[in-house]
Amino acid sequence: QACSEHGKVYPPFPTDFFITQQKVFVKQKKNKEKEDQTKIKMAEEEVIVLNFWPSMFGARVIMALEEKEIKFEYKEEDVFGHKTDLLLQSNPVHKKIPVLIHNGKPLCESNIILEYIDEVWKDDKTLRLLPSDPYHKSQCRFWTDFIDKKVFDVGRRTWTKRGQEQEEAKREFIETLKVLETELGEKVYFGGNETVSAVDLVLISYYPWFHTWETIGGFSLEDHTPKLMGWVRKCLTRPAISKSLPDPLKILDRVSQIIKVHEFFYGY
């Protein structure tokens, strides 16, 4: 009701406004408490990554952790030399990297690890790598599987084969990337225009190897798939991605050494 003082009439007290403001304040406080609890939980958890530095499979795991701002301990493995007991115990079946160890529990296979990371560390402010919708999630899995089956195989053949076999590998590699370029369409990322998805992380994990495949194979992806290379440059503007990928020149140097040794002992 209106009130008066010294003959003046004042409007009714705006109780609805203050009730609304109180609700907003309570909601913000709860969200802040939830966010603080999440940060405390993340800080208390033990996360270890076993990896070999040139690995595209390990790189995507590291990028996912960085994108979600999860602290972790990195441990380098000599996969072609002496594998550590920790690796052999954590992945006794395949004895391969990457391995994610979360509070003492090991997980293997990079794309399985990505899904685990996405499910364990999720809140309203955390990047989601896979959609919640079952159909869109299945499509995301399809493309990550496609990339690993096609890009890895044909990319490797561009530097391990010679002559006609190498030419066929180059043609198939470029065709594969054109398929992915078509799937990207006009989107900024494979996950949409706002942020990256598991598909983006899986494909960009191969980028450090592109330079090696182009140099040894004698072709330019910029000429054949310019839109996809534009996507690469956009991904590299994200600190979580750019700082997690190995140096392309170091990979080329290592591969060149392998080729020289192979030529010396076996020839081509």
Image: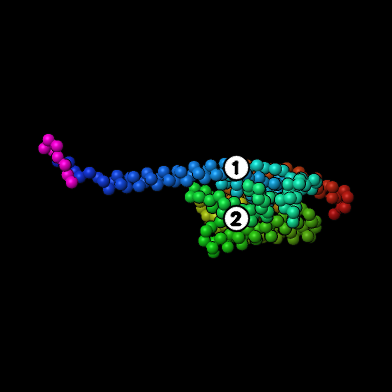
Q: Amino acid under label 2?
A: Glu
Q: Residue 23 lies in magenta, yes or no? A: no
Q: Residue 8 occupies which quadrant of the picture?
A: top left
C-alpha distance separating marks 1 and 2: 17 Å
Q: Which mark is residue 201?
A: none
Residue at 53% over, 57% down: 131
Left or right? Give the position of 69 relative to 99: left
Relative height, residue 160 to residue 251 (above, below):
below
Mark 1 and mark 2 lie on one chain; the one further toward the N terminus is 1
Residue at 33% over, 45% down: 21
**CB contact under 8 Å: marks 1 and 2:** no
Residue at 28% over, 46% down: 17
Foreground residue among 25 and 69: 25
Foreground residue among 258 and 172: 258
How many numbered discs? 2
The magenta segment is: 1-8
Which residue appears farthest toward the bottom when viewing the image? 135
Q: Amino acid under label 1?
A: Lys
Q: Which mark is residue 115?
A: 2
Residue 11 image position (x, y, % from top left) = 19, 43
Left or right? Give the position of 170 relative to 181: right
Residue 27 image position (x, y, % from top left) = 40, 47
Foreground residue among 41 and 150: 41
Residue at disc 2, secondary structure: helix
Residue 213 in sight from this viewpoint: no
- The crowding category of the residue bearing disc 2, from other C-alpha atoms within 10 Å (few below 14, some 14 to 19, many at least 20), is some
Residue 240 image position (x, y, % from top left) = 59, 44
Mark 1, residue position = 71
- Name the image colouring: rainbow
